Image: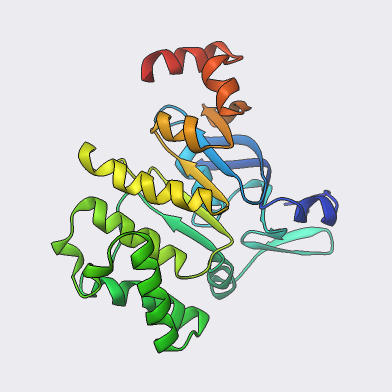
Amino acid sequence: MPAPADSRDSLESFAVVARGVEKSFGSHKVLKGVDLRVEYGKVVCILGPSGSGKSTFLRCMNHLERIEAGFLRVGGQLVGYRQHAGKLYEMRHSEVARQRADIGMVFQSFNLFPHMTVLQNIIEAPIGVRGIPKRQAIEEAMTLLAKVGLTAKADAYPRTLSGGQQQRVAIARALAMRPKLMLFDEPTSALDPELVGEVLAVMKGLAAEGMTMVVVTHEMGFARDVGDSVVFMDGGVVVEQGTPSEFFNNPRTERARAFLGKVL
């Protein structure tokens, strides 16, 4: 894989830079050359029908999926690869794990450790990966639990929480690593409708604080009200990109108009 030609200065001015990203599963090509730039402090919402490659692209941003062409940089650093003599070489697992510490991710399923309390779930990685002293990790975890409205649940186990509460814990756990970027992969899709609002409220709060976020979502209201830009994907490519006002009020492509006609 050839190394990217962009200048270092231009790359470091963006939180995320993707160029020509391709990914296949067997003979099925899921991503067919995806380009994207995300500015620091902005919220980018990725929309599109099921199977369009949205979640796969998000997982490529922290090397949970290995790209096959193109490149991805987060914070100016290649994701999952190092550059040497004009070529890219995949990093070792330990190196990728250290890199992921700067990229928080919240999944559709909550992925909490069932045998640990809420507090233990949150402090595990900061202590083990960041090397934060336990007392400090606990103090920071309690601050995060207050942020997501779950201070009283610190000693509870995940099985005793509602889906919305578990997802808020998952957000707190990701934030405990002090990430530079937060990725959300349809964070409300597994929730009952009445629980969606409490998770979106936390995400809106993060956006208001200036957290850089890339959100794959079916929540059109969130994308319209909170997103700084909307990326519409279909068939493994970016079909359209613009501000929420541009996309929702005056979509440029027939495919985007057809999509909005079905979901709005």
Please say if 196 is above or below 244. below
Image quadrant in which the C terminus is located: top left
Name the residue at 22% across, 69% down.
152
Is residue 75 rendered to the left or right of residue 7? left
Residue 178 in the image, given as x and y percentages of width and height: 52, 68
Q: How many marks?
A: 0
Name the residue at 41% across, 13% down.
261
Please state which of residues 179 and 240 is positioned toward the viewer in this rendering.
179
Query: Is any atom of residue 32 visible in this view?
Result: yes
Residue 196 in the image, given as x and y percentages of width and height: 29, 42
Name the residue at 49% across, 79% down.
129
Is residue 136 rendered to the left or right of residue 73? left
Please say if 37 is above or below 101. above
Residue 194 in the image, given as x and y percentages of width and height: 21, 39
- Figure quadrant of residue 99: bottom right
Return the residue found at the far left.
160
Please state which of residues 126 and 153 is positioned toward the viewer in this rendering.
153
Name the residue at 63% across, 68% down.
91
Is residue 32 rendered to the left or right of residue 53? right
Query: Is any atom of residue 113 visible in this view?
Result: no
